[in-house]
Image: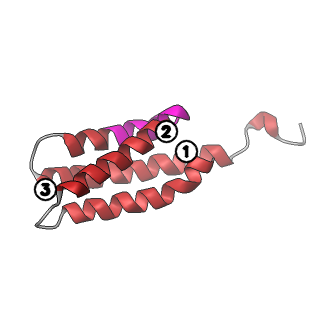
Amino acid sequence: MAFLELLPQKLQRIYSLVERLALPKVDETTLRGLGRLLDDIKGNSAALSLSGLAETAGRMGMLVRGGGGMPMKVRGLRELNSSLKVNYDTALRRATTPEAGDSPDA
């Protein structure tokens, strides 16, 4: 749960880095920083068995490091960032919703 509580700040950082990549002049350090951030999310998500988050972060990392033009990367990263937010919402809902057998009335 602690990892999921820290994720909204990281998602906002990813959003700002992707939008920075859309600018005419892109610094390589922006790409490397985004790659490290995505690798961190992927590793922590995989360790917690949050496969949707881990898979999406991994795809975003591959897109950052892969070939192709910057407009293609930005378009793909924007789409995957939306998917990452959906996967985050799902993981948070699962973590905060009690299971059927955990009710105090049972």
Q: Which residue lies under the disc numbered 3?
A: 71
Q: Main secondary structure of the magenta part?
A: helix
Task: Name the residue located 21 percent from the left edge and 42 percent from the top edge.
Answer: 65
Q: Which residue lies under the disc numbered 2?
A: 45
> How many numbered tags mark residues here?
3
Determine whether the residue tagged by mark 3 lies in a helix, strand or loop. Answer: helix
Q: Are the two marked residues, 1 and 2, in contact with CB atoms closer than 8 angstroms?
A: yes
Residue 82 seen in render: yes
Which amino acid, mark 3?
Answer: Pro
First in sequence: mark 1 or mark 2? 2
First in sequence: mark 3 or mark 1? 3
| Residue 22, percent from left and from top | 18, 63
Residue toward you, 15 or 85: 15
Task: Name the residue located 44 percent from the left edge and 56 percent from the top edge.
Answer: 10
Residue toward you, 62 or 83: 62
**Which quadrant of the figure has residue 14?**
bottom left
Residue 79 seen in render: no
The mark found on residue 91 in the picture is 1
| Residue 2, percent from left and from top | 62, 49
Give the crowd class for mark 1: few <14, some 14-19, many >=20 residues within 10 Å: some
**Region in magenta:** 46-58
Which amino acid, mark 1?
Answer: Ala
